Amino acid sequence: MQTMMSPRSVALHSFVRCVSLRSKTVAAISLALAAGAVAAVAPAHQATGFKLTEPTADSITVWTRVTRDAERAPDDGPLPITHLFDRTTGQEIPLSNNATYSNARPVITFPAGVDLGSIRGAAIGGAGQTRVRYRAAGSSAWSTTEWRDADPQRDFTATFSLTRLAAHSRYEVAVEARLRAAAAISSTTAGGFVTAPTASDNAAATFVVMSCQQYEDRDRPDGFAIYPSMLALKPDFMVNTGDAVYYDHGPVHAINVDLARYHWARMYGFPTLRDFHRQVASFFMKDDHDTLTNDSHPGDRTGDLTFADGLRIFREQTAPSEPPYRTLRWGRHLQVWFLEGRDYRSSSEADRTQTPTILGPTQIAWLERTLAASDATFRVIITPTPMVGPDRANKDDNYANKGYVVEGAEIRALLARQSNLTVITGDRHWQYVSHDKTTGIEEWSVGAATDSHAGGWNEETPRPEHRYLRIKFGGFLSGSVTPASASAPAALTLRLHDTAGKIRFESAISTARP
Ligand SMILES: [Fe+2]
């Protein structure tokens, strides 16, 4: 039966068709019009929320993304079907966790009526514009950025650099989205952040560090329990040390660019993650599974996804500052170093004829120089993979493994020359605090994000180098700086938490310099 439309409805309908909206949206609009409604449609959404990254004393980056749909697709939805064929022999290769398909031709198909935007957990990007409004908490005047187009070449993301902010201040922020210039705002998401205190400020600080979250191992229907647990501590900032997604696990491996982006959207569309990242500024570090595949190196590829694609997509999705090795000053007492463990790693081929490197000479020189120049009370080195260990004997990816023993000893000796320094590592799926037998360097492993993702270390009895060991369970780490007072020097306390936030181990990692 033909449905009659008012002239206004017909005009709107024609306009919507001519801007080539996706068929699903057009269908929804047509239905609304058929019912006699002419209310504004809301085609630009933010199903993956926004992220606040790289806060300093006077700046922050706001990562935004426009999505086609208001919410991510359900987690019981259909999956794409993957077939991989050896490019040389034509033989089919089975999918297996941790595999790298270096010589494989992928063929991805979808069940009838399903596309990349409607598979399990998807939140596909969509055309639109975003802008950011922000103001110091308590002030009445909002500052507003220009509208920017979500970049289809960068998964419909847009980043904004907010500058000339006041130090040690709380800001409110709202990200708005619309379909196009002059269109009504169709999505608004609000949040907030704090800027760093200046280097002379005798300030308190609280931060959280987490690692290794796998979609299949989530422990809540809306994501991960550690996010509300971390949020309850009201941290000034968080650090994700890497493996934010696992490209090479589960029924959908990221063997092309589209599926890599699907992994990010599926993860960061979870309500618990959206809710956290709109309220706490973050530093994202990459590791192997969120760059390409297990223990990956520059030059590697899996299916149609290259290591270079992986680096580009990581930057696109997490908005880190450049270069990726960087240091953060948070008040008089705390300085944090974020080490980059993938970009400058020597290739497996080069390692046959040279001393293998993880950090590379330029980053090592920067580390030495910036550590020597630091006048912070406490130095915290955050590394995607361990520097001390102990680790399993069959691994060869980090400074606790035999393949990197030469550079590992050099780095640990460099760190041991500093006072009040500790190391925090991600990557290992068990929690520990250990001391290096040679240098005395202390390392805290934050562990996996969930209990079901924990594993890898089966010895229940601590070794002599362990101060603390907790296996089979996930969690996160928190650190808190207590400022100096008339009666006591500043203190830094580190804590290992379980996924519910309960403290399982804590220690003042060092005392203030004499
Ligand atoms: Fe991991």
Image (tube, helix red, strand yellow):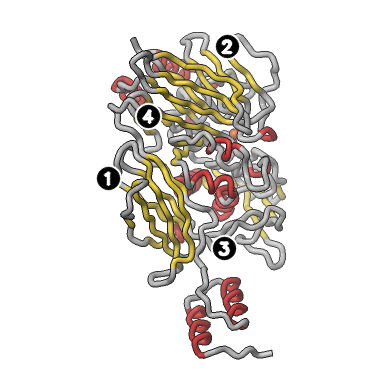
Nearest to the eye among marks 2 and 4: give it: 2
In space, the residues marked 1 and 4 are separated at their CA atoms by 29 Å
Q: CA distance from mark 2 to mark 4?
A: 28 Å
Amino acid beneath label 2: Glu
Q: Secondary structure at mark 2?
A: loop
| Vertical relation: 412 (above or below) 281 | above
Task: Give amino acid for label 4.
Answer: Gln
Instruction: Kindly identify which numbered label has been placed on residue 363.
Output: 4
Q: Earlier in the sequence, mark 2 or mark 4?
A: 4
In percent of width and height, residue 63 lies at: 43, 50
Q: Residue at x 42, y 71 (%)?
A: 183
Q: Which residue is mark 2?
A: 465
Q: Which mark is residue 164?
A: 1
The answer, for residue 297, to whether it is visible in the render is no
| Residue 379 relative to residue 408: left or right | left
Residue 512: which quarter of the image? top left
Counting residues from the start of the chain, the first of labels 2 and 3 encountered is: 3
Please say if the residues under marks 1 and 4 sit with CB atoms less than 8 Å apart. Answer: no
Label 2 within 8 A of ligand 1 by Cβ: no
Q: Which residue is mark 3?
A: 69
Give above or below for 249 relative to 32: above
Q: Position of residue 351 (x, y in %)?
A: 49, 27
Looking at the picture, tell me which residue is in the foreground, 223 or 362.
223
